[in-house]
């Protein structure tokens, strides 16, 4: 059955397929960290629906929450009408927000995908400021719709000004560290304040506190605070894209919490829907100056996603899974750094909490920062799959192996993941 399904889908689906190319499996059952394929093989899933599954697959509290809504006879589709399910979700979400935002927050339900929420954020700040420009960063990823794509690294759009995101390992200035972050911040200030720089008047600045698709690059807390000051001083709304970093993933409930930065707008999706599609923006009420109906969308009321999401948020909060992610993630980072000393093809190990990246490089070179090795990364991914471990690749050169395990990962599972990864790396190097 598995071979037939794989063959038919590879013929029927668009050439743009992504995950399915590198991961020729047919999942039929899943629980927690584990996926079972149609061929009966079991895999440890460190892709987690691209970082969506904070509690892993089919967590009992999520299944129960979904069943409860179904059994209650509540309507599943209600556009953006108020419901008890939405009320419970919003209450739970607001309880997780930075205090200063929670006291004065508005929420806009945006539709199923993270990219929908990014578009809504851009529209909101443009509407509120009357300005058109956007400030975005090198290496960013915000989605696949026109506006979100334009703000992502590599795209060009006359309204988007590309600013330098600090990066220790591949700092374009060859500096890195605090000094690199300081230079990046000054560059930003110079561009914004020089009337001759040609920067279109910015309606907002959007950033990921840890770049995910860009190769797992955590921004220094000091740099984030600096971006907060720079934007506040110039009355530019700061938009934090927490689509991938949210709900405990980085070791704090929201990744901005590490730095104490309170953004004007937070973009949320992935884990907030507890594995079902849900995306929202939360923002300070002063920005809420748009007219009724100014932002619409049919699928803004997914009741099952809100119920699954509320259950997820509550479970993460009550079980302190962010703290758990911080501790376990730090331990895994340490072990991977140990592995790197024995394998020069690991150029860099980085991350925050359970958002981890391992950059593979061509070691036999004299360059300060050795060149990325995408073919080796692809080989590692294949060898991982052969050993029953699902990982994803990312980064500007697709040479970063990314680990996004569920926050419920046990110590034993973490050991199994790293053991399989180490084996796969050794096999790929041969
Ligand atoms: N922002 C970030 C930071 C993301 O990581 C992603 C998805 N990887 C998106 C936005 C877009 O979300 P979606 O794929 O649900 O549109």
Image (spheres, rainbow, N blue to C red):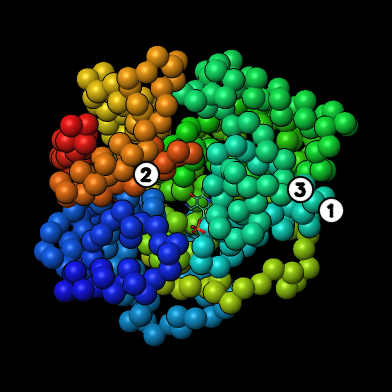
Q: Mark 1 or mark 3: which is in front? A: 3
- Tell me the residue that label 3 is attached to: 158
Q: Tell me the residue at 48%/73% (across/down).
A: 302
The secondary structure type at the circle numbered 1 is loop
The secondary structure type at the circle numbered 3 is loop
Q: Mark 1 or mark 2: which is in front? A: 2
Q: Alpha-carbon distance for marks 1 and 2?
A: 39 Å
Q: Tell me the residue at 67%/34% (across/down).
A: 163
Say which of 380 and 116 sits in front: 380
* Residue 44: assigned label: none
Q: In this view, does 109 lie to the left or right of 324?
A: right
- Tell which circle, 1 or 3, labels the residue nearer the N-terminal end: 1
Q: Residues within 10 Å of mark 3 (few under 14, many from 20)?
A: few
Say which of 82 and 118 sits in front: 118
- Tell me the residue that label 2 is attached to: 393
In percent of width and height, residue 260 lies at 56, 33
- Tell which circle, 2 or 3, labels the residue nearer the N-terminal end: 3
- Tell me the residue that label 1 is attached to: 130
């Amino acid at each position: 059955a598995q071979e037939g399904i794989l063959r038919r889908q590879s013929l029927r689906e668009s050439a743009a397929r992504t995950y399915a190319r590198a991961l020729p499996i047919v999942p039929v059952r899943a629980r927690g960290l584990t996926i079972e394929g149609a061929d009966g093989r079991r895999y440890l899933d460190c892709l987690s629906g691209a970082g969506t599954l904070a509690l892993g697959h089919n967590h009992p509290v999520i299944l129960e929450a979904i069943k409860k809504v179904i059994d209650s006879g509540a309507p599943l589709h209600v556009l953006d009408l108020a419901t008890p399910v939405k009320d419970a979700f919003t209450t739970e979400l607001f309880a997780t927000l930075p205090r200063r935002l929670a006291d004065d927050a508005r929420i806009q339900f945006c539709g199923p995908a993270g990219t929908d929420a990014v578009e809504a954020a851009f529209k909101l700040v443009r509407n509120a400021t009357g300005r058109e420009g956007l400030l975005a960063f090198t290496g960013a990823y915000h989605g696949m719709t026109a506006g979100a794509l334009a703000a992502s690294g590599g795209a060009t759009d006359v309204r988007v000004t590309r600013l330098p995101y600090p990066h220790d390992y591949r700092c374009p200035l060859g500096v890195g560290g605090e000094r690199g972050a300081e230079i990046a911040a000054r560059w930003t200030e110079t561009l914004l304040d020089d009337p001759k720089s040609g920067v279109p008047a910015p309606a907002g600045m959007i950033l990921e506190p840890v770049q995910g698709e860009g190769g797992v690059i955590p921004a220094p807390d000091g740099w984030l605070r600096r971006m907060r000051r720079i934007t506040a001083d110039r009355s530019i709304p700061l938009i934090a894209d927490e689509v991938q970093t949210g709900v405990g993933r980085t070791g704090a409930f929201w990744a901005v919490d590490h730095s104490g930065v309170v953004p004007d707008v937070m973009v949320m999706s992935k884990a907030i829907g507890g594995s079902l599609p849900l995306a929202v923006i939360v923002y300070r009420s002063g920005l809420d100056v748009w007219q009724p109906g100014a932002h619409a969308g049919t699928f803004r009321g997914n009741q099952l996603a809100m119920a699954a999401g509320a259950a997820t948020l509550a479970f993460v909060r009550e079980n302190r899974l962010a703290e758990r992610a911080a501790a376990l993630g730090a331990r895994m980072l340490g072990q991977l750094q140990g592995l790197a000393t024995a394998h020069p093809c690991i150029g860099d190990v980085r991350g925050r909490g359970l958002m981890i990246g391992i950059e593979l490089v061509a070691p036999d070179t004299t360059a300060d920062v050795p060149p990325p090795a995408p073919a080796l990364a692809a080989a590692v991914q294949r060898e991982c799959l052969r050993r029953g471990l699902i990982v994803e690749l990312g980064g500007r050169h697709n040479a970063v192996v990314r680990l996004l395990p569920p926050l419920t990962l046990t110590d034993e599972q973490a050991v199994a993941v790293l053991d399989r990864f180490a084996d796969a790396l050794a096999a790929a190097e041969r």
